[in-house]
Image: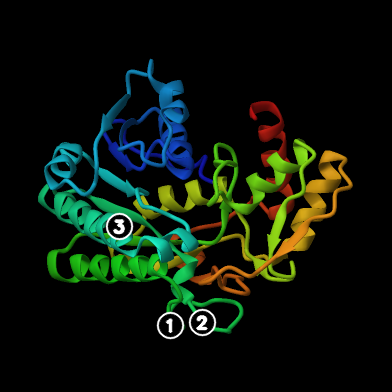
């Protein structure tokens, strides 16, 4: 279980785009801990230099400040790289509704730039961040690859388009691509600040400061919250996957289902707080319920997540207590 037994050749070089972000910095750390070289590409628009400055003295670490919307930068970053872990993107469904043109430029053109740069550099595997948002208005639970509905936001559309391009790059050019459909990832280094902050770090921060968090909706929308260690496992195992399973997308989750109000109560209890939340309006573009079938990732990638929501949430709370 996990990724401790995933072994790479010491000559293998990983490019992590968006490496200064939440998921990207955790990937950088895990790869460096394995003794491999990491190139981190980030324009620091949403990522933080502080997330990766902890690696600055590691001889296997190289930081490139640059933008995936610039093809020349993408080509430079891919030089002598074995594996690309493409995490760079703008997240947040509500923000994408406000800024659709920017999401098109970064999430679609940026990903296409990276695919082409990886192809030209003869990269071995291209593993990229997709999203559970591609399931759109599908009411089916659990979510199964191949049974998607109509997307509900520009963000979701960008991820669906990325999957289409990745499929074509596999079929037309032979680039091994693997789409990671993340389900509500949480864990250390996830930003608790700002209007578009994810719900778990925001709850923790506000409760820690004795403020009342807002829950959008009635609190009974459900999510398959996924601890970041599971995401690291999925990415590294995809790098080892058979080419027979390339060109496809995979649900990356634990396979559970938590209601937001229950998540709030777990965090409140762990922090010793008795603060009633504020219930606000539902957010445009949000999926009501989310729960993943991870059979395909288990079968094709050897994905075997061992971080349940319960195990992950207490680890996350402890990290935030020590770091914010």
Q: Position of residue 232 (x, y in %)?
A: 48, 46
In the displayed image of the protein, which residue is found farthest to the top? 57
Q: Nearer the viewer, residue 145 or 51?
A: 51
Look at mark 2 in the image and give the residue it sits on. 137
Relative to 154, residue 209 above or below: above
**SS for tag 3?**
helix
Q: Quadrant of residue 62?
A: top left
Mark 3 or mark 2, which is nearer the start of the sequence? Answer: 3
Q: Position of residue 289 (x, y in %)?
A: 63, 74
Q: Is residue 220 left or right of residue 38?
A: right
- Spatial CA distance of label 1 from label 3 is 21 Å
Q: Residues within 10 Å of mark 2 (few under 14, many from 20)?
A: some
Q: Is residue 255 left or right of residue 212?
A: left
Residue at 51% x, 44% y: name it. Answer: 3
Residue at 36% x, 60% y: name it. Answer: 99
Q: Position of residue 95 (x, y in %)?
A: 45, 58
Q: Is residue 128 visible?
A: yes
Q: Residues within 10 Å of mark 3 (few under 14, many from 20)?
A: some
Mark 3 or mark 1, which is nearer the start of the sequence? Answer: 3
Between marks 1 and 3 in the image, the one whose residue lies nearer the viewer: 3
Q: Nearer the viewer, residue 150 or 318?
A: 150
**SS for tag 2?**
loop
**SS for tag 1?**
loop
How many numbered marks, from 0 up?
Answer: 3
Look at mark 3 in the image and give the residue it sits on. 102
Relative to 306, residue 15 above or below: above
Q: Nearer the viewer, residue 105 or 5?
A: 105
Q: Quadrant of residue 209?
A: top right
Quadrant that contains the C terminus: top right
Look at mark 1 in the image and give the residue it sits on. 150
Q: Are marks 2 and 1 in contact (CB under 8 Å)?
A: yes
Residue at 51% x, 58% y: name it. Answer: 303
């Amino acid at each position: 279980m996990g990724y401790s037994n995933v072994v790479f050749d010491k000559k293998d070089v990983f490019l992590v785009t968006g490496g200064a972000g939440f998921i990207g910095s955790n990937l950088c750390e895990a790869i460096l801990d394995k003794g491999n070289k990491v190139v981190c590409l980030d324009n620091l628009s949403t990522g933080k230099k502080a997330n990766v400055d902890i690696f600055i003295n590691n001889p296997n670490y190289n930081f490139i400040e640059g933008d995936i919307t610039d093809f020349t930068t993408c080509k430079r970053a891919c030089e002598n790289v074995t594996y690309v872990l493409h995490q760079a993107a703008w997240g947040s469904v509500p923000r994408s509704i406000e800024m659709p043109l920017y999401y098109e430029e970064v999430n679609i053109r940026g990903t296409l730039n990276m695919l082409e740069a990886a192809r030209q550099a003869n990269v071995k595997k291209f593993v990229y961040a997709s999203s559970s948002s591609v399931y759109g208005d599908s009411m089916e639970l659990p979510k199964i690859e191949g049974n998607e509905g109509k997307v509900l936001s520009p963000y979701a559309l960008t991820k669906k388009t990325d999957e289409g391009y990745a499929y074509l790059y596999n079929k037309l050019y032979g680039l091994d691509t693997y789409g990671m459909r993340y389900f509500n990832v949480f864990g250390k280094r996830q930003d608790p600040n700002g209007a578009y902050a994810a719900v778990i770090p925001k709850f923790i921060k506000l409760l820690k400061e004795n403020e009342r968090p807002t829950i959008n909706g009635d609190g009974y929308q459900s999510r398959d919250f996924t601890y970041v260690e599971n995401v690291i496992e999925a990415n590294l195992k995809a790098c080892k996957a058979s080419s027979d399973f390339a060109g496809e997308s995979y649900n990356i989750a634990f396979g559970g289902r938590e209601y937001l109000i229950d998540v709030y109560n777990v965090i409140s209890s762990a922090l010793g707080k008795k603060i009633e939340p504020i219930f606000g309006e539902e957010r445009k573009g949000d999926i009501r319920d989310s729960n993943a079938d991870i059979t395909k990732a288990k079968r094709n990638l050897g994905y075997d997540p061992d971080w349940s929501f319960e195990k992950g949430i207490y680890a996350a709370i402890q990290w935030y207590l020590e770091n914010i």
